[in-house]
Structures are given as C-alpha cells and as structure tokens.
Image (cartoon, coloured by chain):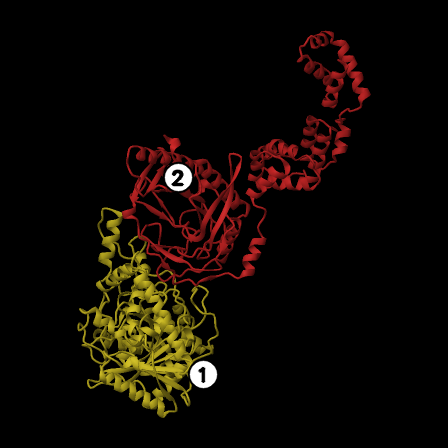
Chain colours: A yellow, B red
C-alpha cells in the first residue's frame, strides 16, 4: 500500500512514531498527482516546492521532539476560493486568473499554524456556482469512479483529489451542498459545519449568509481531525460564533444507542432516484441495528427550499461579485472608451455564463418593485424552514436523508439545463438555509459502481452527534473504497 | 412674483465622525496623509474580507440622536447600497436603509429673532467612499482609498425650512452641536461635513411643489446660493407655464448654477438589502441612557439660555457659544460670582477674543482664571476702576500670577469716587474754562462733554466718569 492511500489519522500516528517522514508522504502524494492528475484534473494550482519545504520543516520539528497537531505533516488541498497569501487564488474564474491574495484566509492560516502541508488549490465551479465543477474557467475535473462523469460541485476538485489519492485531506466550501454533494458523488466523507463555526474571513464570498468552509476526508475520523483545526471564533468575522468547541476527534464514538434519527418523507419524493432512496433506507436500517431509534418526520416546507435558496444566494452573489469591476485587481478588458464600457466589457468577458446568470437573477430579485415578491418572501421562507428544523429537533437528534438525488452524471449531461442542474441541490440546500451542520458519508454504490451519499443533519453545533452517527455507520458497513484508476 | 411663492427646503447632512479608527476595520481615521497609506485589505474591499463594526460609531451616532431629540432604535440593521464607482471598492456602501439608528427628532434653530423647530427624520450610520484624483501629470484617474470606511452619519431633516436663511441657521446649528458633543471635526475644507439640498416651491395654501435635489454641496454659503438659485429657477419655470421635473442636480458653485444630473426616470436602483456579513445592532437600554447623560449642554440650548437668563443679544450669545472655550469661560465666570453678564460678554468677544487671536492660544492656557476675571469685571462694573484701567490689569494677569488689588495699588489705578475730591477738581476746571461754561449756559450742550473731559484729564483719568459728570452738571 502506497503512503497516499492511508487515512490521515493513520498517517498522523506513523509520523509521530517516526515510521515515515512528511517529506516521504508528501512525495508519495505528488507522485500520485503526477500519475493521475492528467485524468482527474483536480487542481488549478500546485505548490510542490513550498509543500516539500513545509514537510521538511515538520520532519525537523518531529525529530526535535516538538508536540505537533494531529494534522501536522499531512498533505492537504485547499479549494481555490479560500485565500492563500502569496499563492494564486482564482475561484476558477478568468476574472481572478492571476490574483494572488495579500493575506491568508483564517481557515488557511489555522491549517498552516497546525503544520498541515498545503499542496495546492483545487478546481471548483466558478465562484462556487454549480453542482458539477463544469463551470470552472480552467478545466473540468473528472469523477475518479468514472472519468466520463462529473465529481459534483462546486468543491469537485477537493472531493476528487481526496477520492483519487491526490490529497489526504481537503478544505471545501458549502453554500448549498458544495461539500456534501461532491463528497457523495466521489465516495468520500464531507462535513459542512454549523454556520459560524468556521471563520469565513478570506473565503471569497458567494452567498455570505450561507457560505461555510468545511472538510473532506476518506473517513469520519479524518473529518473530525481537520474540523477541529479550523473551528473557532474569529473576531474578524462578525458572523463567527463565540463558543467552545470540544475536540470532535477526541470525543468521537460509534455508540449511538438510543439516538433518535428522523427520516423526513419530503426528501424521498419526486426527483430522487429509486436506487438512491433504497441505499439510504438501507443505511438507516443499519443505524437502527446499531441502536438508533428511527422516527418518521415531516419537514413540509422542503419543496420551497430550492427556490428560496436560489433567490437568497443569487441576491447576495450579485452584490458580493460586484467588486470584480476591473479597477483594482483581476481581469480588465483590453480596450474601452468610457468607465461604463470598462465595467461592462470587463464583467462580460471575465465571468462565465453561470455566474452571469446568477448575478442577473440576484440583481432582478433585489430590484425595486420585485424585492418584496422575491427576496423578502424567500427570507420569510428561510425563517419557516428554520422553525421546522427547530421543531423537529425537539423529537430527534439527527435527520437522515440522501445527499444527492442521483449518482454522478455524465460531463455535459446537465450543463445546458440549469434547472436540472439546480435540482442536484434539492436535498442539501435546506441545511444551509437553516445554518445546520451536516455530513455526507458513502452509503453504497449503484449498478455502475458509482457511490451514493447518506446525509446526516444535526441541530446547530451538534457536529459531535452528526459525526458519531456517521462513524457508527462507517464502522458497521466498512469505509472508503478506492476508485480504480 | 417671487413673493407669491414659498420655498420648501429639506437637508441631508453627511458628517464624518472623528473616531480613532474606521467604521469596519482598524485602519486609522485620519485626513491629509499620503495617498493609500491608511488602508488595509478590508477597507480596500479585497475578495474574502469581512467588515466588523466599530462600536464607537454607534455610540457617536446615538449621542447625536439624543442631541436632536430622536427616538433611538436599540435594534437596527445595516444594509448594502449597491452601485458601481471606482472610489467604492466593494461596489456597495454599507449604510442603513429602512431601520436607521435614530429617527423622529427635532432641533430648534433661531432665525430673525424667533426660535423655530425643524423636524429630523432620521440619523443613520454609513461608510465614506474614497476619492478620485485627477491630474495633468497622468492619463485617466487614480483612486485614493484612505477615506474608504471613514465613519459617517447622515442626518436627514424634514422639509421644514422656508428660506435659505433658515437652511443656513439649521446647518450652523447642526455643526455647532456636532462640535459640542465632540463627534466630528466639521472641517468644511476637508469635506468632513457635506450636504445635499432638496428644494421645491409652491404658492402658500397649495400643496408642495415638485422637488429637486442638489448633491455634494460642500459649504454652507454654497448651500445658501444653491437654494436661492434653485428657488428662482423653479419659480421662473412655473411662471412661464412650465412644470418642474423631479431630478437630481449638481450645484456648480464656481459658476453659480445648478445642472441636471439625472431625472427620476433614470434614478439609480440601489437594490438595498440587509448586510449579511454583519449582525443586527443591539444596544442595551443602559448604554443609551449613559450616552444621553454624557451629553453637555447643547449649543442651541445654551445660546437661548444666554439670551433669556442674561439678556445677551442673540448674535453675541451665538458668537460666544460658537467657540466652546468661550462659552466655558462665560459659564465659569458667572459661576465665580460675576454679576455683569453683558460686560462679561463684551469682554469675551472683545479683549479675550483678541488675546486668543493674537497669541493663537487658548485662554485656559493663560494665567487668567474665571475667578480673577469675575473680580476684574466686578471692579469695573462697580466703578472701582475704569475700563481703561481694567485693560491694563487684564494685560498683566494673563501672563503674570499676581493679585488684582496689588496691581491696582501699585499702578494707582483705583478710580476716585470721593465727592469732595471730585468737587475740588470741578471747581478748578470750571474756573479755568469760563468761555465753555458760558457756552453751555447759552444752550451749547456739547460744551458739557468738553468740560467733563477736562475734569477727567485733570484727575489723570482716575475720576469715576459718571460721578464726575454728575458733579459738573450740578455746578453748572
């Protein structure tokens, strides 16, 4: 077994016991990248030189007996919308093709403070808008289980990198399912934490009230380890919640006896493939066998969630992305006769179709005369969805649903049909709207060997329960299965 | 024809607050430093940066809210105002839309001998934008981001003013309040206070006319000129049978004209929505109360107190109040026992102002104390020393720590009020000026002044002038 194939927690022990060095491990990952990246195209930017430097530094620290964090020396990929000082951060957009941030995102800073080895920046849907990573300006990332298929999105690069062994861990961001859905489609574990758990400072915003940075790994333990590192209050982010976060890793247990799991009927309806429903129900049964109590519940506003999501997210995006105007950094059109023309040409040329679609949608819903009918209504719906979840958590601890309504689809299959593409988020957007934590864990494969994801949703700041449930399931059925590449 | 119309004016005043740091980042809030040195990724609007609210800004705005008798919205939010311009790096300004921090207030102004109440619709907090720089030395424009994120309050009045004079009085009152509560430097030349003017005209008894807004007026006199020009322009349109178009106009102060910028039809849609990066502002009741209690006596209130309690005329009172240090000296000297407020007012506006202007120093950095000033003025008022002698004493006590009585004695400055002594002088002077005495008796009353003057001269200026005059009159 090659080093890149191990789980992070295993590697962490091997490093501590000096059985391996971080340089060896990092080289193993880069060798893997050399052999499969042409097929997968998970990265926008690789940083081999600095990665090896960091690895050597970690090895030196281990040799001198320093006590290091659990993720010290572990090769970790970072989604390309998380600012990294001195390292190009593009959001997979022509607009930021040559943008090098002058500061680190808080999460990237915490990662580096924990001595993780940052190996590169992963491909994504442009400005995190998409569910297939096909809207990237640079490349189309492939699903490691079938390279003719999408890895999901928008954090498709991070999911594919972890799945294919091109990274051991990865950070992503999740606005409507952008961590969980690609995790499901690539057969890995992905956690979207509670809104406010991880600082958004330096995360290039798509929809500020919904965005949250989270973790990818090949097992629940790895996710717990990485999430511990990036959690915490940040005075630079007003929406960051100031509360204690006991270690998820230290407190991880697969004992779920008596845990009440709610299964909402609304997440198993029209648009969700039958084989997805079957695999998820099978997983629920497995949890029941392990001591959980299963309850049928109802979240009646779910049907409206997708509309509310696309209104709120697009509205915020239309404002967040207005700063890309060609004045200070990023792309600027070559020739223009006036300021207005400079703006128009820069933004027309610098943004891709999906981004422009959402900016126009968002601009429309905020326009005077339409605000009340769209944005205001969507915010009311958000309140209703939040209330429904709050009520549900009076009776259950965890809510179990599919992550994605279907397994990985073919590249190009949905790109011409935005509504079909948007429907990929049908099971995940409610979680962002309600600001809740949720994990996706692999739960079986379809006839073509494509992975399915089980989504486990917890109440605010109940990441521990979420991960314990996922851990119990993982231990019961066996964990990550490598794609054959 | 102008007399047939009434003008209606409403004002929006933007005042930069003088907090240490900017509103959403820790950059220094300072004017006049080298371009693009007081900046950071946050106020430059770099991707991924987030604002965090400087709570001092909330405190300052609440103080102004109290000063203008507003209701304080203890729970309010911040909103994004979206528009593109190179000096606005995020392409939105964080401001407050439907729920401002303060609303429904008023302020009393004083015009033509009368007090008038002007309604204050709202006060909200927002961030300033940067500045475009143009020069012959380079093509295009450059941007200075130093001013980005400087905290502002916008004070919106009701359309309660009926003349440019009232508008001017309102602006001056707002400015003096800002200075008094210490939340803004109000330096017009640095643009730290600016205003937008709304003007309409109508015939009394008829509904308000269509209004025009003039933007970016950076002096009070400019506002007055703008209002007068706009009033005339609108009346002319109406008199010629036309209709005033609702529009935004730019006031060109150099040429004394307003120029149309955009009509209502092409008004920008700012697409306000709640700022998702910031939490709801929640201010507890104790904080609101403490801020109210921290306010000093407001200048408009103080001015009226000087008029009503001490009989000063409005202009003198306003001039004293205009300079907080002078008002402090006035109040402290009265408190020290001075019973001659009008004399005090004259001295503050006369010799004391002169001293301050000539030395460029604060009167409080001199050795004059309110106690000494009170004593000095009491002596003058009681006729113990003359005004001229008072000035001699004043010149000494501002720079030397000496007692007034000691100086009077040393320089023999005390006035002679001893009747016998004064009668003796009068007898001598009248005897030497028989012609003038005769003139006076023949009806040339101005001979009296000459005779009293001669008596004063004979006393070497020490005679109590009113007593001297009385005695001369008696003897004639």
- Of badges 1 and 2, nearer the viewer stands 2
Residue A357 drawn at (x, y percent): 23, 62
Residue A266 drawn at (x, y percent): 29, 79
Q: Is residue B210 above or below residue A256?
A: above
Tell whether A450 sits left or right of A428.
left
Tell whether B403 sits left or right of B72.
right
Residue A104 drawn at (x, y percent): 39, 64
Q: For mark 2, what is the residue?
A: B205
Secondary structure found at label 1? loop
Residue situated in front as seen by the camera: A229 or B394:
B394
Q: Residues within 10 Å of mark 1 (few under 14, many from 20)?
A: few
Q: For mark 1, what is the residue?
A: A251
Mark 2 belongs to which subunit? B
The image quadrant that residue B322 belongs to is top right
Tell whether A61 sits left or right of A382.
right
Mark 1 belongs to which subunit? A
Q: Is residue B438 above or below residue B332?
A: above
Q: Residue most toward the bottom?
A: A289
Query: Which label is found at residue B341?
Result: none
Residue situated in front as seen by the camera: A170 or A49:
A170
* 3D distance between C-alphas at marks 1 and 2: 77 Å
Q: Residues within 10 Å of mark 2 (few under 14, many from 20)?
A: few
Callout 1 touching callout 2 (CB < 8 Å): no
Residue A60 drawn at (x, y percent): 42, 75
Secondary structure found at label 2? loop
């Amino acid at each position: 077994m090659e080093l890149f194939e191990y789980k992070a927690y295993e590697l962490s022990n091997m490093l501590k016991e000096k059985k391996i060095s971080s340089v060896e491990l990092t080289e193993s990952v880069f060798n893997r990248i050399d052999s499969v990246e042409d097929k997968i195209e998970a990265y926008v930017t690789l940083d081999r030189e600095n990665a090896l430097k960091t690895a050597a530094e970690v090895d030196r620290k281990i040799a001198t007996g320093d006590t290091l964090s659990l993720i010290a020396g572990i090769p970790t990929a970072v989604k390309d919308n998380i600012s990294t000082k001195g390292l190009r951060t593009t959001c997979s957009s022509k607009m930021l093709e040559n943008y090098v941030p002058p500061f680190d995102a808080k999460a990237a800073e915490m990662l580096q403070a924990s001595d993780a080895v940052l190996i590169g920046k992963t491909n994504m849907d442009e400005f995190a808008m998409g569910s297939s990573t096909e809207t990237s300006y640079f490349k189309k990332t492939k699903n490691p289980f079938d390279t003719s298929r999408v890895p999901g999105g928008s954090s498709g690069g991070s999911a594919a990198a972890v799945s294919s062994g091109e990274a051991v861990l990865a950070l992503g961001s999740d606005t409507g399912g952008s961590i969980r859905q690609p995790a499901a489609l690539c057969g890995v574990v992905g956690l979207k934490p509670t809104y406010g758990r991880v600082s958004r400072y330096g995360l290039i915003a798509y929809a500020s009230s919904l965005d949250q940075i989270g973790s990818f790994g090949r097992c629940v333990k790895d996710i717990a380890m990485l999430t511990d590192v990036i959690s915490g209050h940040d005075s630079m982010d007003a929406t960051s919640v100031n509360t204690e976060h006991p270690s998820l890793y230290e407190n991880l247990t697969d004992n779920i006896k008596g845990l009440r799991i709610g299964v909402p009927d609304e997440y198993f309806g029209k648009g969700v493939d039958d084989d997805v429903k079957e695999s998820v129900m099978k997983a629920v049964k497995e949890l029941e066998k392990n001591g959980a109590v299963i309850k049928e519940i109802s979240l009646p506003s779910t049907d409206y969630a997708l509309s509310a999501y696309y209104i709120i997210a697009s509205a915020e995006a239309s404002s967040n992305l207005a700063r890309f105007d060609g004045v200070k950094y990023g792309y600027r059109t070559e020739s223009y006769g006036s300021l207005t023309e400079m703006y128009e040409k820069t933004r027309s040329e610098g943004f891709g179709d999906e981004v422009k679609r959402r900016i126009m949608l968002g601009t429309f819903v905020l326009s005077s005369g339409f605000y009340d009918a769209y944005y205001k209504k969507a915010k009311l719906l958000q309140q209703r969805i939040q209330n429904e979840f709050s009520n549900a958590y009076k009776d259950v601890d965890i809510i179990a649903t599919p992550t994605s309504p279907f397994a990985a689809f073919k590249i190009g299959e949905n790109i011409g049909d935005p509504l079909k593409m948007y429907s990929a988020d049908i099971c995940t957007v409610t979680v962002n709207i309600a600001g809740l934590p949720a994990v996706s864990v692999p739960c079986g494969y379809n006839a073509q060997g494509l992975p399915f994801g089980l989504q486990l949703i917890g109440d605010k700041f109940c990441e521990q329960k979420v991960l314990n449930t996922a851990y119990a399931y993982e231990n019961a059925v066996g964990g990550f299965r490598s794609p054959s590449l | 024809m102008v007399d047939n119309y009434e003008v209606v004016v409403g004002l929006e005043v933007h005042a930069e607050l003088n907090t240490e740091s900017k509103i959403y980042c820790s950059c220094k809030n300072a004017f006049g430093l080298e371009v693009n040195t007081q900046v950071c990724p946050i106020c430059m609007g770099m991707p991924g940066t987030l604002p965090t609210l400087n709570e001092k800004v909330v405190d300052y705005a609440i103080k102004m809210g109290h000063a203008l008798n507003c209701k304080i919205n203890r729970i309010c939010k911040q909103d994004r105002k979206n528009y593109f311009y190179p000096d606005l790096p995020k392409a939105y300004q964080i401001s407050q839309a439907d729920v401002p921090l303060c609303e429904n207030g008023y302020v009393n102004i004083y015009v033509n001998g009368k007090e008038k109440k002007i309604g204050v619709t709202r006060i909200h907090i927002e961030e300033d934008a940067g500045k475009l720089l143009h020069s012959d030395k380079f093509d295009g424009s450059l941007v200075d981001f130093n001013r980005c994120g400087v905290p502002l309050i916008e004070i919106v009045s009701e359309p309660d003013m009926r003349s440019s004079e009232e508008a001017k009085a309102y602006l001056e009152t707002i400015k003096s309040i800002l200075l008094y509560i210490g939340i803004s430097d109000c330096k017009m030349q640095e643009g730290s206070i600016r205003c937008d003017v709304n003007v309409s005209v109508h015939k009394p008894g008829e509904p308000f006319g269509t209004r025009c807004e003039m933007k970016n007026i950076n002096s009070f006199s400019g506002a007055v000129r703008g209002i007068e020009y706009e009033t005339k322009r609108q009346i002319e349109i109406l008199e010629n049978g036309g209709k005033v178009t609702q529009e935004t106009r730019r006031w060109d102060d150099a040429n004394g004209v307003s120029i149309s910028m955009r009509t209502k039809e092409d008004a920008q849609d700012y697409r306000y929505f709640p700022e998702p990066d910031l939490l709801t502002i929640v201010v507890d009741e104790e904080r609101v109360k403490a801020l109210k209690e921290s306010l000093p006596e407001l200048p408009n209130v103080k001015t009226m107190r000087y008029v009503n309690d001490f009989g000063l005329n409005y202009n003198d009172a306003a001039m004293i109040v205009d300079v907080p240090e002078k008002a402090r000296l006035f109040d402290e000297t009265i408190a020290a026992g001075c019973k001659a407020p009008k004399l005090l007012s004259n001295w503050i506006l006369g010799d004391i102002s002169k001293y301050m202007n000539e030395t460029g120093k604060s009167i409080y950095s001199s050795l004059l104390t309110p106690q000494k000033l009170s004593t000095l003025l009491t002596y003058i008022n009681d006729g113990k020393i003359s005004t001229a002698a008072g000035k001699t004493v004043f010149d000494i006590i501002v720079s030397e720590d000496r007692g007034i009585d000691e100086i009077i004695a040393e320089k023999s400055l005390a006035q002679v009020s001893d009747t016998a002594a004064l009668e003796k002088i009068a007898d001598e002077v009248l005897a030497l000026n028989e012609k003038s005495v005769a003139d006076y008796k023949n009806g040339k009353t101005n001979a009296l002044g000459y005779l009293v003057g001669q008596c004063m001269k004979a006393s070497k200026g020490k005679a109590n002038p009113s007593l001297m005059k009385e005695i001369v009159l008696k003897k004639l």
